[in-house]
Image (cartoon, grey):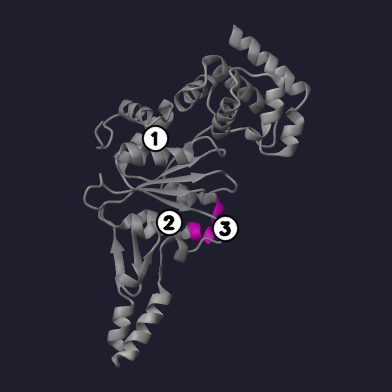
Amino acid sequence: MTAGLPQSVDDVVARLAHGRYVADRDLATVVFLALRMGRPLLLEGEAGVGKTEVAKVLARILDRRLIRLQCYEGLDVAAALYEWDYARQLLAIRLAEAAGERDRERIAADLFSPRYLLKRPLLQALEPAAEGEGGPPVLLIDEVDRADEPFEAFLLEVLSDFQVTIPELGTIRCQQPPITILTSNRTREIHDALKRRCLYHFIGYPSAERELAIVRERAPDAGERLSQQVVTMVQRLRAADLFKPPGVAETLDWVQALLSLNRTQLDSQTVHSTLGALLKYQDDIAKVQGPLANQIVAEAQALSRG
């Protein structure tokens, strides 16, 4: 399969499927537009619905390097863009002094040269693609909603012009912008100015049909009966007013847990024993355990027999 950019929405669907990502047509369309228009793509949705995986699969199927910036509270420019290697600079000063070097300007020029620059993800993404790479990298700015608003404001400049200024070295311009994917779990609202610089798509929980296709693709060792029962139960739990409904990632984790126990179908005891692979809050587990779980297991068993 060619590593060039997709030529149509159908091509995106086919390539994502080749990368074992089951995408609906709406997602494939916005991915195609982001690639064709050269625009960043902001993917929002609950944790575990496959936002980060989009960037990972794109990097694989397009034969591009994946550069990931994991956002967190307190993330600053030094951690995201660059910083100077102060330890090596100090050592260089001492070596210069020991060698009798007295030209301060020459020492300073050497200290603030690229060889002492620690390139962080954003700066790495602006560099030209290395020989043998398929093109500019895929830049994943993951969970941007966890970063502080000042860092979000800094991203506006980077995503607008894909250039940064390092006072000691000047302005670094990107000739071919990276394929940029931003993700948000909606722990806070992203500023409108950042959204305007991106194409936007919300990834919700999948339908039962698509989730079953995902399980078949990502957990092929699970039999059809077990796959159908798992998907039926997960879909039912998402309608049960839980604090944190299970995402697709948890569905796949649960299938793997059941396979590790050599289960070929659900039973109440196994469900109660393995809920920790599916639900991550004790209040949710307590709410599901007992009659509710037994009822859902019975429904899942009946549907799979039908």
Which region is colored magenta?
146-152
Is 138 magenta? The answer is no
* Residue at which label 3 appears: 73
- Residue at 40% across, 61% down: 120
Q: Can you tell which mark lies on residue 169?
A: none
Q: Residue furthest left?
A: 131
Q: Can you tell which mark lies on residue 156?
A: 2
x and y percent of residue 172 in the render? 30, 64
Q: Residue furthest top?
A: 306
For mark 3, does the 10 Å Cα neighbourhood hold few (<14), some (14 to 19), or many (20 or more) residues? few
Give the secondary structure at mark 3.
loop
Give the secondary structure at mark 2.
helix
Q: Nearer the viewer, residue 41 or 252?
A: 252
Q: Nearer the viewer, residue 112 or 97?
A: 97
The image quadrant that residue 82 belongs to is: bottom left
Q: How many marks?
A: 3
Is 148 magenta? The answer is yes
- Residue at 49% across, 63% down: 76
* Residue at which label 1 appears: 30
